[in-house]
Amino acid sequence: MISSIANQRVKNILNLKKSARARKEKDCFLVEGPRMFFEIPEERLLECYMTEDFAGKYQEKLRGMKYEVISENVCRHLSDTKTPQGVLAVVKRAEPSLDDLLKKEEKPCFFLLENLQDPGNLGTIMRTAEAAGVTGIIMNRETVDPYNPKVIRSTMGAVFRVPFFICRDLSGIVRKMQQAGICVYAGHLSGKTFYQYDYTKGTAFLIGNEGNGLTEEISSLADCRIKIPMKGRVESLNAAAAATVLMYERLRQKEFAENV
C-alpha cells in the first residue's frame, strides 16, 4: 500500500492534476471516480490507484486488472473532489488529426471553440456533442485545457468517445474545412436567426468566449453569422447552452425534419 504523500508516484499524480503542461509533456491525464474509471478503454489505461475499500467493493469488476492500493489519506490528497470516491487512473491522451475527422463522415458536423474558459462549459459541450451525434470538436490553445480534471469530470465519460483536439491555428482549420466543402457558421449577435439555414450538409459552428464571444478575426472567416433569438432582457446564452441549441437543430434537420 502507498501510504505516504511523499511517495514519488503520488507526487507525479499530483503534478498531473495541477499542471496542464505536465499533462501535455507526459501525454496523459487523470480520471477519478468509479463511473468514469470503468469506461476507460483498456488500451488507454496506464496506471490505476485505489483504496482497499474500493478494491473490495468492486472486486469482481477488477478481476485480472493490475492496480496499486493507496491509503485513504493519500486518496484524499490526490482527489480533485471534496468527497473522494476511492479510485484514480492515469489515462493516455488520444487526439485524432483533422484529416481523420474529415474522413469520418460524408456530411460531418464540427464545433470549433475559441477561447472558452469555463471547465463546466467545455465538459458540457463534449457530453452534449456525444448525445447529438457531433463528428468532432476542435479548440484553440487559449481554450481551457480539455484534460483539466473539472472538464474530465463534467464530460461524464464522453471524453473517451467524442473525438477532439487542440489546434495551433483555428483560422487555418476554418479555411481547411471550407476547402473541404463544409459551411462554417459563426455564433454572433449581429447574425441572422439560425433557423433560416440548412445544416443537413457538412457544417461547422464557431463558438466564442463566454464574455466576449468570437474575435473579429475568426468570425470574419465564417460563411454565415447566425444568432439564437431571445426574448426578454437576455443578451446572450451560456456558451454550452448555445452550442446545445445548435447541435440539436442540426440533428433535427438531419434526422427528423422529414417526419414533422
Image (spheres, helix red, strand yellow):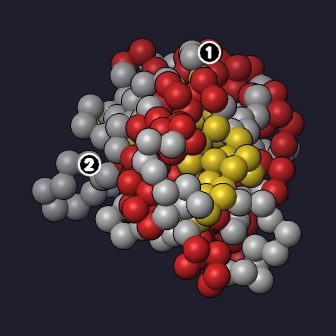
The residue under label 1 is 172
Please state which of residues 168 and 46 is positioned toward the viewer in this rendering: 46
Are there few (<14), some (14-19), or many (20+) residues within 10 Å of tag 2?
some
Q: What amino acid type is highlighted by mark number 1?
A: Gly
Q: Is residue 103 above or below residue 162?
A: above
When the figure is inspected, residue 238 is found, relative to residue 257, above or below; the finding is above
Measure the C-alpha gap from mark 2 to mark 1. Answer: 27 Å
The numbered mark, 2 or 1, whose residue comes first in the sequence reads 1
Residue 75, position as x, y percentages in the image: 46, 60
Q: Position of residue 130 (x, y in %)?
A: 64, 59
Q: Nearer the viewer, residue 212 or 165?
A: 165
Element class at badge 2: loop
Q: Which residue is mark 2?
A: 236
Image quadrant where residue 53 sits:
bottom right
| Number of the label disc, if any, that sits on residue 95 | none
Image check: 70 left or right of 103?
left
Q: Residue at x 27, y 57 (%)?
A: 230
State whether residue 203 appears in this view: no
Left or right: where 35 falls relative to 187: right
Residue 205 higher or lower than 68, as above or below: above
| SS label for mark 1 | helix
Confirm or deny contact between disc 2 and disc 1 (CB under 8 A): no
Q: Is residue 142 visible?
A: yes
Q: Nearer the viewer, residue 99 or 229?
A: 99
Up the image or down, 60 lies above or below 30; here it is: below
Give the amino acid type for the residue marked by disc 2 in the picture.
Answer: Ser
Q: Answer few, some or many: residues within 10 Å of disc 1's Cα (few below 14, many 20 plus, some between 14 and 19).
A: few
Front residue (pair 19, 155): 19
Measured from the top left, where is residue 70 in percent x and y?
55, 61
